[in-house]
Image: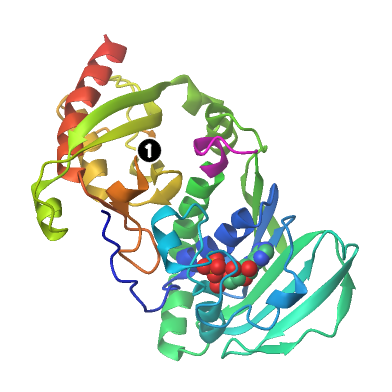
Amino acid sequence: RASVHRITSGQVVIDLQTAVKELVENSLDAGATNIEVRFKDHGVKSIEVIDNGSGISKENYEGLALKHHTSKLSNFEDLTIVRSFGFRGEALSSLCALSESVVFTTATASEAPMGTVLELERSGKLKSSDAKVARQRGTTVTVTGLFAPLPVRRKEFERNAKREFLKALNLLQAYALVPCVQENQGVRLTVFNQVSGWKTSALQTDGSRSLKSSVSSLWGPKQVENLVPLDLRCIVRTDKASLKRQGILEEQTTEVRVTGLISKFSPGNGRASADRQFFYVNGRPCSLTKIQKAFNEVYRSFNTNQSPFVIADFQLPTASCDINVSPDKRTIFIHSEGNLILALKVIHLLIVRRVSD
Ligand code: ADP
Ligand code: MG
């Protein structure tokens, strides 16, 4: 039996990166095929996410940003089999509490081309839903003055805006690849940053379902030349410590499939690309620091400072991992991580050897 960690409560939104992530996740959950993210002054002024998803239906207006209000999960048992990104109804309530204002405009298929403006209070309560605007099916969220209610936090954000923006962009790159990783319908993602009136494009994908083609639109065709497909299956033992924690006595094994792309090792590739390493568990972007380290160590064992470009999705039974460890869901606990790392190191070594020979 899988153990579900107690849901950690606490702020979901801790920085610009997580704020944007939550909004884009909501758009993906709404089935959007076109998502546009607009930063103003690197997000310091505002962040806007525009999608062509399902829109929000009237019965969800009142509770929209109330804590633990979600339209995505019907009971607690579902937590072990969640497929949608959101399921706890915490993001919007966090965003309202932490921003100057949060405004939605939304229209469902039956309402379009007439949309409704939803203004929210800091408490997450619906302030008004009276105004109407022209709008195609989908939802626009505008978050203004992130962290304004926390002056110290706000100052820090303003001071580090550019760095925060780059971090957010890196996470958006991870999400831009999600539809390909999940082998879902293609999603066009466009990101703009507007600084003192000047709009610049920061990221764009073509909505292709091919991972290589998306890599090409994100980093240019040259990046693709060097990549080989990753497709491994291994059966790994569940880590002893993890079994013990769950009170399980007998040994267990899990079948893990790893798919994606990895760069060939070649002496000419000088660039270390630690910012071009993307890990997913069942199609959900996450940070797998130990596994990342393992990939890098194999490269280092070739006596260079190179890190591989890697996109790796770990497909494993939902009972073999736990996404409820941290509020932002970026940390995923894999019950067989230790053994998985050992397996990966060996396999990776073989791959790197083979492709560089
Ligand atoms: P969660 O995603 O965990 O359900 P959120 O606080 O992120 O919680 O969102 C609350 C609810 O608001 C969602 O369950 C969904 O019904 C609605 N919602 C938010 N953003 C969108 C969107 N872009 N399109 C459609 N519905 C949305
Ligand atoms: Mg959400």
On whether residue 181 falls in the magenta region, the answer is yes
Magenta residues (range): 178-185
User: Mark 1: is the Cβ under 8 angstroms from ligand 2?
Assistant: no
Residue type at tag 1: Gln
The answer to whether 201 is drawn above or below residue 76 in the figure is above
In this orientation, which residue lies closer to the viewer: 99 or 1?
A: 1
- Identify the residue at horizontal 68%, vertical 52% (top origin): 32
Q: Quadrant of residue 76?
A: bottom left
- Identify the residue at horizontal 30%, vertical 71% (top origin): 6
Q: Position of residue 197 (x, y in %)?
A: 73, 66
Taking the view exactly as shown, the residue that stands out farthest to the top is 357
The answer to whether 324 is drawn above or below residue 312 in the figure is below
Name the secondary structure under disc 1. strand
On whether residue 19 falls in the magenta region, the answer is no
Which residue has dot 1 on it? 315
Left or right placement of residue 191 versus residue 315 in this view: right
- Identify the residue at horizontal 47%, vertical 70% (top origin): 88
Q: Quadrant of residue 186?
A: top right
Crowdedness near tag 1: few (<14), some (14–19) or many (≥20) residues, C-alpha within 10 Å: some
Left or right placement of residue 175 versus residue 346 in this view: right
Residue 48 in view of the camera: no
Colouring rule applied to residues:
rainbow
Left or right placement of residue 166 versus residue 194 in this view: left
The answer to whether 190 is drawn above or below residue 295 in the figure is below
- Identify the residue at horizontal 63%, vertical 73% (top origin): 46
Q: Position of residue 63 (x, y in %)?
A: 63, 81
Q: Position of residue 303 (x, y in %)?
A: 15, 26
In this orientation, which residue lies closer to the viewer: 114 or 296?
A: 114
- The C terminus sits in image quarter: top left
Q: Position of residue 335 (x, y in %)?
A: 22, 49
Residue 152 in view of the camera: yes
> Across the whole image, how many numbered discs are drawn on residues?
1
